Image (cartoon, rainbow, N blue to C red):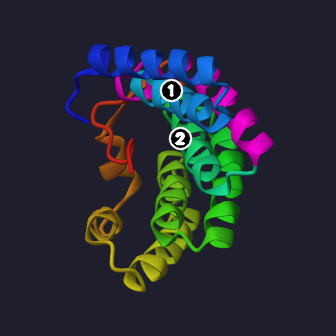
Amino acid sequence: MLGQYDLSERYYREANRRMRQRKDTFGIAYSYCGLGNVERMAGRFRKALPFYKRAEKLYGTIGDRVSYAYTLWSLGTTHKLLGKYSQAHRAFFQADKLFKSTGDTRGRIYALLGHTEIAFIQENQTQGLKWWKEAKKVSDQSHYLWEKLHVDSFKGGTTHNLKKKYQKAGSQFHPVSLPINWP
């Protein structure tokens, strides 16, 4: 979160090494997700994907639905930032299903905002507004102030306003700022 990605990567790699020595599947998965987060937060989105895939597989193996859901959210966010919207939606749907099953309203808000953002980027304001209303409903029933702020930041959201945060480059949007790149 401080932008010290090299330092964070070093710690996660060391944690991964130690967890492998211990054969601690949860620790290995967590460190892979952390390495994916380092790459995603640093804007190296393609490099993040293999780490998330490894974490996803391990969390699925041990049945950790809470961490698995956040890994899916991270995967969806990475796909969104790469302009792979159908893959992003799929990951957000899977994450939201797990967030519902674990009662994680914070995670649900982020998954719903992921859908919202994609709809506005794709200039589908009707669908974007539908997703936003669902996120608003969930956030209004929660006590998460930061997440409510994220939801409310979309209140006047239009395709034009959202595209200001993205630059068109070929067939993909690249973030100028990352409005929802971390929970």
Q: Which residues fall within the magenta stretch?
A: 40-62
Instruction: Please state the horizontal and vertical placement of residue 131, each as a whole percent of the image.
Output: 54, 68
Of residues 12 and 108, which is closer to you in this image? 12
The residue located at (68%, 28%) in the rendering is 53
- Magenta stretch mostly in which secondary structure? helix
Q: Residue furthest right?
A: 61
Q: Amino acid at mark 2?
A: Ser
The residue located at (58%, 49%) in the rendering is 67
At label 1, counting other C-alpha atoms closer than 10 Å, the crowd grade (few under 14, some 14-19, many 20 or more) is many
Label 1 SS: helix
> Label 2 belongs to which residue?
74
Quick check: 57 above or below 127? above
Quick check: 29 above or below 158? above
Contact between marks 2 and 1 (CB within 8 A): the answer is yes
> Label 1 belongs to which residue?
36
Instruction: Please state the horizontal and vertical placement of residue 94, each as a whole percent of the image.
Output: 71, 54
The residue located at (38%, 83%) in the rendering is 140
Q: CA distance from mark 2 to mark 1?
A: 8 Å
The question of residue 50 being in magenta is answered with yes
Dividing the picture into quadrants, the one containing residue 30 is top right
Quick check: 136 above or below 116? below
Dividing the picture into quadrants, the one containing residue 148 is bottom left
Instruction: Please state the horizontal and vertical placement of residue 157, each as a whole percent of the image.
Output: 34, 61
Q: Amino acid at mark 1?
A: Gly
Of residues 28 and 81, which is closer to you in this image? 28
Q: Is residue 29 left or right of residue 2?
A: right
At label 2, counting other C-alpha atoms closer than 10 Å, the crowd grade (few under 14, some 14-19, many 20 or more) is many
Of residues 66 and 36, which is closer to you in this image? 66
The residue located at (68%, 61%) in the rendering is 98
Q: Residue furthest left?
A: 2
